[in-house]
Structures are given as structure tokens and as C-alpha cells.
Amino acid sequence: MAHSASSYCQGCGSPLKVDSRFCSQCGRKLTLRRQTRLPFKPWMMAPAAALAALLVLLPTGLYVWAGLPSTSNLSTARLPLSTRIYDRTGTVLLAEIHQGSERRHIVSLAQVSPTMRAATIAVEDRTFYQHGALNLLRTGQAGLEDLLHLRFDQGGSTITQQLVKNIYLTEDRSILRKLDEVILAIEVEHQYSKNQILEAYLNRIYYGNQSYGVEAASETYFGKPATQLTLPEASLLAGLPQAPTDLDPYTNMAGAKARQRVVLDAMVRAREINASQAKTAAAQKLALRPATSADDVKAPGFVHWVAAQLEKTYGNELLTNGGLTVVTSLDWKLQSIAERQVRDKVLALGAQHVTDGSLVALDPKTGGVLAMVGSAGPDVPGGQYNMAVIPRQPGSSFKLFTYTAAIESGKFTMASFVQDSPLSVRLADGSVYTPHNYDGSYHGWQPLPHALGNSLNIPAVKVELGTGIDRVVDVARRMGVTTLTQPAGSYQPSLTLGGYEVPLIDMATGASTLAAQGTYRHPQGILKITTHDGGVLFKDDPGQGKPAISPQVSFIMAQMLSDDSNRALEFGRNSDLVIAGHHVAAKTGTTNDFRDNLTVGFTPDLAVAVWVGNADHSPMQHVSGIVGAAPIFHGFMSDALNGRPDSWYAVPNGLHMVNVAGYTAYLLPGTDQVAQSQQPPAAPSCDEDCGGGGGGDKGGGHHKHH
């Protein structure tokens, strides 16, 4: 006990002497202060250190937090999401459209198989649902390792920490970045449920091979949605994020399987499966989907056609980053048939300088594009072009519109005769147009169905001029031809012989209009578009279509084009235009110098147009429509109609039948006198028996079209 020299007595105020126990002036007993030293206890260190750390880290944490991004939105809107294009069933993936080479697809947690969820949690964060943002035990162990080795690269991160690192942070391994991670993880856990965090994680994590998120990974490796993943598949996928390149199953299946066993063992420890299930799953040999690029496309001509429409309507940003799901009208079975027929038949004609082909098939009842082959293959000359939509001369297949206009006008009938004789037409510029038949001959008076079926050019021009070119143009436009944009009076007589370019899809649409008994429906490739969150952006409604031609006129055309006897003169019987067991209307066309040839036809349920030629317009070697396009048409129709019952049209009300030169003709009301006035002066002499009641090809480019 002691007091300082400057102390004073509290009684009299006199100065006190050092070590005195009594005041020397008043004798008062002094009360001296005891100087004590706090004893040190070991347990005091932890609270003291914690307090010190808090005093240091709190200001630092606040400073760091102020510069961190907001976690108020774990939305997928920040992700570039692939647009997926499917066939009409929504099960055959045709293509993914994306920015760069990444595959990204967003699904809800409910769309991920429970097995995949369990496998991920077991191997990445077994107590995910029990702890908060941090697993303190694992983090402490990892942190101790970091401190001992003076580096910050140990594991221990929870799923939440991995998620915030994936979304918000760089790959920097500094202690400040780790602090950022901890703060953001705490915020995320505060704002979102565990299921929301797990869903976001599964949608963002990288699984290798340009696949981000479990849905993209499931499609890439197994060709199935994540909801269908089995235990062997899920356990393999769950192990990939640790080292997606090193564990790539395509290049290192042994490594991927070794990691799979780690996942399965973790699932056993987590009591998600038993040891027997783990052993069985590990032993199962997995069949991987063949490795593909994110740029691989099925039905490329069709997909690019659809993508162009999507971009025009919704813009490139939504198309490439919006995560749309597009269900198209494409029938994958018919598409496969079409691709095989085009490829094989074009290859067979290689010696005759045929390098390319195209096909379009439509559903007349909806306008849906069921098949579209843009070329014979990506490696053929010009194979990058979609010949289904590029205008080319259609040859005599354009007569489809000429004869429809003629019947509709009432100036010609199914019972009319037309003289096949030399013809010269003086044009407005003073020049003379002289058409010729494909065979260079003249065939005298021919029934209208016979002139159409055998594709005689001179009768076709006479019918065109008798009907009026402007009316032919009008009918072609109504039936779906989009390229006749000049004033109707500006077209020349070569129109009926295919002298003006028309896209193949327009020819298919014209056939589809007749197949639908005169109802036009715009070719439609998209059935439904949904956004990444399930909202419906578009849904096709085929509706009633637009009346273009009367059912009566359409029926007459179908009858003329389907009767094999009508084309026997030029094509013989049972040509490739005949499909055994089925009524099929068909018309061929070949342009001048054999640069293009087509076959166009239909049944009540299917309209088809086929083109064969060379993309660079170089001529084929004597390949007409019946030799080039017709075999493809025949092969496609035969396979497409196989197993289907034959179907045809009932006679519409308003028509009446007459017998002309041994065949049955159907007449529109009020056209009997026209038919009578167009009979030959004497009984016709046909090279083959004259048909008429059902459905040829000869012509000339600017002068000859078959």
C-alpha cells in the first residue's frame, strides 16, 4: 500500500509524508489505495482476440461490403440463355441458338431429378440444409490449412459460397476476395430459401463441353432432360464441376468414373442410397450421347428459316440470349425421309451433273411445314444455301396456276379441247414469242386434262392467253406465290411455262391451297414459343385460312392432276408420279437448258414440292422433271403415305358430270355452252387413250419447259 508525495490528508488538508499511516498534523488515520494487478487466465485470450478481431474486421467488412454487388436478384436475366428449337413433338432437339459457344438452359428445381439434387448436395455440401451461409467446421479446417501454408486455395466452400463466387466474384484467391465471398453468401442466405439457392446453383455451374447448368449438361451427355436423370447418370454429372475439363467423360471416362465413385460414396454417407445401390450404379456402363458442338443443327435449312423469322419478330438479343423454347411444325420422321430421298437421289444423278436438291412438305389443313430440305447436304456445291426459299424458274409446274385460273374464269372447262398447233404471239415491244413443245411435235386437238397432264406447252400458252395473263397472275398470288410483284399486265406469255422465278415453298403452298379445297394458309414453321420462365410468347392458331379458290375449281384441278391416263402420252403408265394405292395429284416442270426441274403434288393431307438442279445455275445433262425431281417425290410420298389409308375428295355441290370422248368431266354451273363451243371439229385422235377424270410435262425455259 502507498500514496504519492503529492497526496493530502482528507481531514485537515495537510501534505502527507510517503509511507505515513497517520497525518502528522491532525493524527487522522489514513485510508490508503491498494494497487492491484489482474491475474492472467488462459481463457481470457479468446474473447480478447475476438474483440480485437472485431474491432479490426468490422470496419474492414463494412468497407468491403459497401463495394460489393447487390444480391437482391438471383434472377436468370443476367445469364445469356440458349434458345432451343424442337420438332412438333417437343422432344427432338433440332438446334440451340446462342451467343458464343455456350449452352445454357434454365429449369426449376422441380425439373431436376431428386437423385441429381441429392448427388450434388452429398458431394458438394452434405449439410447444406442444416447450416447457414458457412459451414464453420469445414471453413475453419480449410482456413487453418491456408494459414499454415500461407495460401488461400483450400476447399470448404458451401454451395451458397460457390454460387456467389460463380455469379459475382473473380477467380482471385486473396483473403479479401474470400471475405467478399463470405459477406455475399450471408446476404444470399438471408434473402433466399435453400431451394432457391440450390436451383440457382444447378442452373449456373459448369459441367464441361460448353454446358452450363444441369439441364444443358443432361442434354449434352445423355440427350435427355434433367428430370429424367438416373442414379448412374446423376452421380457422374454431379462429379464433373470439380474439374470439368480434366474429367470430361468423352476424353477421360476413367477419371469421370473414379469421381463418380466419390459421389456415390458421399451419397452413402449421407444415407441417400445404400452401399448396394452405389455398387450397382458404379458398375453400370453409361451410353453417352455422341459428342456434338453447340452449333450442330438438325434440319439446317428449316432451322435457319425459322430463326430468321424469330429474329425479325423478336430481335437478335432475345433470340440468342433469351432462353426461348420454340416448338416447330417439323415432323422429324418426314424430315428424315425427305433428307434421305434428296441425298440419295441427287447422288445417283451425279454423272449427269446434278449436285443439289430441295424438298418442302406442308400440311394443307394448317399450313404447317412438315419437312424442309434446303440442300442435298452441307458439302455439295452451294450446300450452304436453302434452295427451298430461293426463287428459281419452276418450269411447267407453274401450269398449276394457269389451268386453275382458266377453270375459275369459266373460259375453259374440264370438257374443253385445245388445239396443239404452231403458235406465234406478237408482244408489245414488237418481238414475236413462239413456244414449242418439249418433244418438238404437235399433237392436234387435245382434251384440257390431257394437255395439262402431258404438259404440252403450246396448249398451255393458248389457255393462258384465252384466260388472261393478268388473271393467271392474280390466281397465283392468291394461292401463295409471293414473287410476282410487278403489275399484272407486265408479264409475258412465258409466265405459264415458268419463265419467272418462284421459290419452291411458294409452289408447295400453291399445291397446298388446292389440297385444302381452295383454302390458302400461309406456310407456318412455329407452333409455340415459351420464355425461359414458362410464359407463352406465341401460340399458332391456324384458324380457318383464307378462301382463295372455290372447292369446285380445286376439285376439278385435283381430278385432272391425279389421273395417270392424262399423262400417258409423254410419261407412259405408272411413272414416278404414281403412288401405289393412293390418289395423288402431281405436276412436273423443267426449265430451258435443264437448269431447274420440279415435281409438285398433293393428297388431301400432304402437299409436296421438289426441286433438283445446281445452285450456280449450271445446266444438268438432259435431266427433266420426271427424271430428276419425280423420283424424289415418289420416294418421299411412298414412305410418307405407307400405312395410311387412301383418301380423296367427295364431289362438291354445284358440279355436274358430262361424258366427253370417253372420259368424265366435271363442269362448273353455267359452263356447258363453253364446253360445247370448245369441241374439236371432228373426233379427236389421241396418241394414247384420252383420260381426263383425274391428273406430264413438256415445255421450254423461255420457250421449252417440261
Image (cartoon, helix red, strand yellow):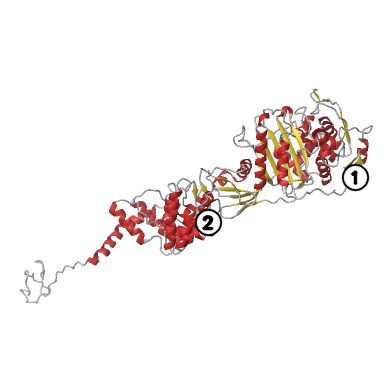
Q: Residues within 10 Å of mark 2 (few under 14, many from 20)?
A: many
**Amino acid type indicated by mark 1:** Met
Name the one closer to the observer, 469 or 597. 597
Task: Identify the residue position indicated by label 1 in the image.
Answer: 657
- Secondary structure under tag 1 reads strand
Name the residue located 89 percent from the left edge and 37 percent from the top edge: 416
Residue 302 on image: x %, y %: 64, 42
- Asked whether disc 1 touches disc 2, contact meaning CB atoms under 8 Å apart, the reply is no
In the rendered structure, the answer to whether residue 685 lies left or right of residue 187 reads right
In the rendered structure, the answer to whether residue 173 lies left or right of residue 432 reads left
Name the residue located 81 percent from the left edge and 28 percent from the top edge: 437
Question: Can residue 547 be seen from the camera position used here?
Answer: no
**Amino acid type indicated by mark 2:** Leu
Name the residue located 84 percent from the left edge and 26 percent from the top edge: 423
Residue 149 on image: x %, y %: 29, 52
- Secondary structure under tag 2 reads loop
Question: Can residue 149 be seen from the camera position used here?
Answer: yes
User: Which of the image's four quarters has the N terminus?
Assistant: bottom left
Task: Identify the residue position indicated by label 2 in the image.
Answer: 229
Q: Quadrant of residue 360?
A: top right
From mark 1 to mark 2, how far is it between C-alphas? 64 Å
Q: Depth-wise, is mark 1 or mark 2 nearer the camera?
A: 2
Q: Quadrant of residue 466?
A: top right
Q: Residues within 10 Å of mark 1 (few under 14, many from 20)?
A: few
Q: Earlier in the sequence, mark 1 or mark 2?
A: 2
Residue 183 on image: x %, y %: 39, 57
